[in-house]
Amino acid sequence: MFNSDRMARSRLISAAQSELNGIEPQVVDQIWDWLNVVFKKWKLELGDRQPTRRVGLLGPDEPLPFEEAQPWECADFILPGRILLFYKLWSESYPDANTIISKVGIRVLIAVLIIKGEHESFDDLFSAHELLSNHRDLDRLEQVRVLLPLAEKGAAHSKTQSVRASMDRKQKPSFQDLLRFQDQYLAKYGHTRGWKKAACSEFNLSDKTLNNILKNMPE
């Protein structure tokens, strides 16, 4: 990923690290392992038996063998990830999620998900960061419920229409839009060479406008 992406992610991780002050690294690793056990158990108990993998934001869904799917790919999200699956299990009061939340604490769990989230989308990392930053009394699930509907494929049609309408109007994309596009380009081609040229074509931007957007990354 390009430098501005790494720098932005590094800032989010540094901010989350303050939630884990005094917790030894091996304990953080144990919490991470426990979270993944919860995710795998949920997949076996309640995960979609016919998962699909979306090819890009606007692309088709391709069938994915259940045995090969990650737990978050069995949760019917547009762009799946651990953070979104954690939100889902939290909001639905999945028993094993309730157990780890009661033992570890919600703020610590979200911080661990951020710190270990090198493969998470920037949007998901940023939403988790916002929860920690803006809800100091974070202990229940009302805040997270507003994050789930747009993440689920049930809202995919309206979201796709919104994205296409935005492109039709040729609105300038946000920094996060470009990060998402670059992630999709990397997933499709296995490298990021030429992604800026592709982004300029996709969003109808000049090289100068694209570079100006990339300079205005979140603090």
Image: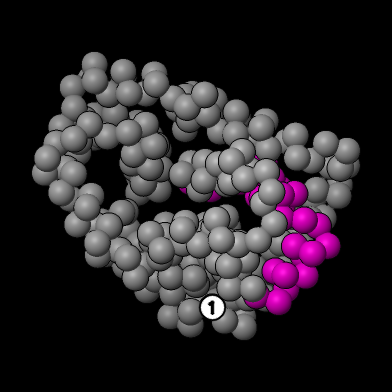
- Does 74 sit left or right of 34 as displayed? left
Whole-percent x, y for residue 206 in the image: 18, 22
Whole-percent x, y for residue 26 in the image: 86, 47
Q: Magenta stretch: give its range.
A: 94-121
* Count of marks placed on residues: 1
- Does 63 sit left or right of 219 as displayed? left
Above/below status of 50 relative to 19? below
Q: Amino acid at mark 1?
A: Gly
Which residue corresponds to mark 1?
47
Residue at horizontal 27%, vertical 24%? 210
Residue 86, located in which quarter of the rendered image? Answer: bottom right
Residue 10 painted magenta? no
Residue 153, located in which quarter of the rendered image? Answer: bottom left
Which is more toward the observer, 151 or 199? 151
Residue 50, located in which quarter of the rendered image? Answer: bottom left
Which is more toward the observer, 127 or 7? 127
Residue at horizontal 52%, vertical 29%? 8
